[in-house]
Amino acid sequence: MPLVSVVLLSVLFWGTLALTGCSQRHYAANETLPRRVAVSEDAARRLSDRVSKALQGRGPLYVSVTEEELTSYLALNLQGLPLRCLAVWFTQGQMRFSAQLDAWGQPEIRGHLGLACSKGKIQVCLIQATLNGQPLPRFLLASVEEAANDALADAQVPLRVERISLNEGSVLVTVTVD
């Protein structure tokens, strides 16, 4: 579901920058990134090929996506956006992300979100996000979350999401073709 991640990350980055200022970097001592995620054309191609192949099948489709594949796919396909050091991690029940904007002093945004499915569409729950280590206020997260969910609901994708399972290092998405 790379399109979904692109929508979510784009809404989050631009909405955050529009509504907050960039401050000096300040990180809590316990805020660390889970692990390094390598970016490779091979990983992005594997994901693209797997999704294309899955869409040719009938019945429920099971698509497994690793951190390396999604990070690589996004990094290589979002080259038109001013993003650097983009990384995505999957943990039990959550997706974490981090990226630097290639503008305004290169602020870094990090966050945690949950993914669920409702009425065949992916729903986002933005749990927490920081800009240069400063927690973003809940009202801002709620508005970004609402915009992301509206965009996902309006997406004209011929797939019905049946289940999302976020695991350590990967996500398994079960979909049916409408």
Image (tube, rainbow, N blue to C red):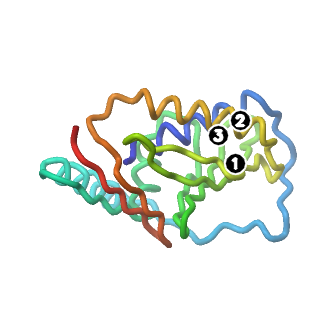
Q: Which residue is mark 1?
A: 109
- SS for tag 1? strand
Residue 33 appears at what percent x and percent y?
66, 67
Locate residue 56 relative to residue 87 in the image: left or right. left
Q: Is residue 147 above or below residue 98?
A: above
Residue placed under numbered mark 2 in the picture:
16
Q: Which residue is mark 3?
A: 102
Badge 1 amino acid: Ile
Residue 70 falls left or right of residue 110: left
C-alpha separation, residue under disc 3 versus residue under disc 1: 12 Å
Q: Is residue 49 above or below residue 146?
A: below
What is the C-alpha distance between the residues marked 3 and 2? 15 Å
Measured as percent of width and height from the top left, residue 124 is found at 55, 45
User: Is mark 3 in CB contact (under 8 Å) with mark 1?
Assistant: no
Q: What residue sits 76% from the left and 46% below the top?
A: 131
| Residue pictured at 51% horizontal, 52% vertical | 115
Of 178 and 50, the residue lying toward us = 178
Task: Give how far apart the Cα atoms at labels 1 and 2 are.
Answer: 9 Å
* Mark 2 surroundings: few (<14), some (14-19) or many (≥20) residues within 10 A: many
Q: Earlier in the sequence, mark 1 or mark 2?
A: 2
| Residue 111 location (% of width, % of height) | 67, 53
Q: Are marks 1 and 2 in contact (CB under 8 Å)?
A: yes
Residue 68 % position (x, y): 43, 63
Q: Amino acid at mark 2?
A: Thr
Snapshot quadrant of residue 26: bottom right
